[in-house]
Image (cartoon, grey):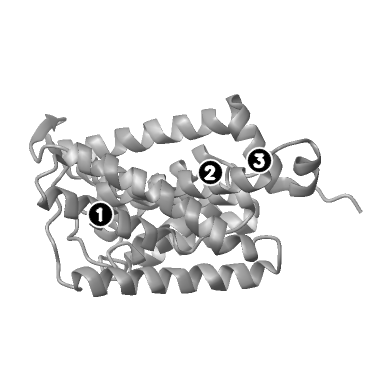
């Protein structure tokens, strides 16, 4: 029982990292209708900014806040001067641009700070607490709680605020939104900026668990995309639940399913994805899209 609880808690912590990136992807899609494959690279760049600030003697919390401000500005600038040229064109072209942007950002990070592993300080204590006879890391608990708070805030943003409703209106029909008096360009910049902020949070959460390198979120981005498809592109709660499911099932399968083990556990989310899409193509919490013809 103790081992099971440990695996579940660790799965929640790992899934929370996937969830942070997945929420950023959902936010960009909700504001622009695009899938941003560069989200992982932007998160890594934000983590490096925080790391540089801490090396200059800035307290960790202030360094993370500084990286969040930097990320918001970076997201807004990228939308305004790069992505806006492709957002309302061919979606395939925009996807290729975000993939190229991921490669560019990763290369810049490696050029500036090298590809060597760097130690990033933890936002939470490394102590453990006892629960049902299991030693649970405070960092795992803190990571999960942060993602829960972000999920709630994001859900409230899109359902309860004028900004969230305006972002959704722009994503669905920018022409009608413009005719209604909404500042479409400014809202697109805000959407990308907020998504970059979520990426900065993900970078600050995962960097202490791994080591800070330009490619540290490459695999996490794959899991985040799987969580987005499983949970539904329109549901912040759905992608978080899906990310937690992936993290937990991956851990349990690695230990309790002999033929999977740790070598094949990466296949678990994709098997789950295959099963869910057969039964519910819009995802567990997604909404069906109705097109009038």
Does residue 125 appear in the picture of this structure?
Answer: yes
- Residue at image mark 1: 49
Q: Could you tell me how far apart the alpha carbons at marks 1 and 2 are, in whole angstroms?
A: 21 Å
Q: Where residue 228 appears, x then y in whole percent?
A: 51, 52
- Residue contact between numbered discs 1 and 3, judged by CB atoms under 8 Å: no
From the viewer's perspective, is the residue at label 2 or at label 3 nearer?
2
The crowd level at tag 3 (other Cα within 10 Å; few <14, some 14-19, many 20+) is: many
Look at mark 3 in the image and give the residue it sits on: 168
Which of the numbered marks, if any, corresponds to residue 196? none
Marks 1 and 3, how far apart at CA: 30 Å
Q: Residue at x 16, y 41 (%)?
A: 60
Left or right: residue 271 versus residue 180 is left
How crowded is the residue under tag 2: few (<14 C-alpha within 10 Å), some, or many (20+)?
many
Helix, strand or loop at label 1? It is helix
Q: Indicate the secondary structure of the residue bearing disc 2.
A: helix
Mark 2 sits on what residue?
190
């Amino acid at each position: 029982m103790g081992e099971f609880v440990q695996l579940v808690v660790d799965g929640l912590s790992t899934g929370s990292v996937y969830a942070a990136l997945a929420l950023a992807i959902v936010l960009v899609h909700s504001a622009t209708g695009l899938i941003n494959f560069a989200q992982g690279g932007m998160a890594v760049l934000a983590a490096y900014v925080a790391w540089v600030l801490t090396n200059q003697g800035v307290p960790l919390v202030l360094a993370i806040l500084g990286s969040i401000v930097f990320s918001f500005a970076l997201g807004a600038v990228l939308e305004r001067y790069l992505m806006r040229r492709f957002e309302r064109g061919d979606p395939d072209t925009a996807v290729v641009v975000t993939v190229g942007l991921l490669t560019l950002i990763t290369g810049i990070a490696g050029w500036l700070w090298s590809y060597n592993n760097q130690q990033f300080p933890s936002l939470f204590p490394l102590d453990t607490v006892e629960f049902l006879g299991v030693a649970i890391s405070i960092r795992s608990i803190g990571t999960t709680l942060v993602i829960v708070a972000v999920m709630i805030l994001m859900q409230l943003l899109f359902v309860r605020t004028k900004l969230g409703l305006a972002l959704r209106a722009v994503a669905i029909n920018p022409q009608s939104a413009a005719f209604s008096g909404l500042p479409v360009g400014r809202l697109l910049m805000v959407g990308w900026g907020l998504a970059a902020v979520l990426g900065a949070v993900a970078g600050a959460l995962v960097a202490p668990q791994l080591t800070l390198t330009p490619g540290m979120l490459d695999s996490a981005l794959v899991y985040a995309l799987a969580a987005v498809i499983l949970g539904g592109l329109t549901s912040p709660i759905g992608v978080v639940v899906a990310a937690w499911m992936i993290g937990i099932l991956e851990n349990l399968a690695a230990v309790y399913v002999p033929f999977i083990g740790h070598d094949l556990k990466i296949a678990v989310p994709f098997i789950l994805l295959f099963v869910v899409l057969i039964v519910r193509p819009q995802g567990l919490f997604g909404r069906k899209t109705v097109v009038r013809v």
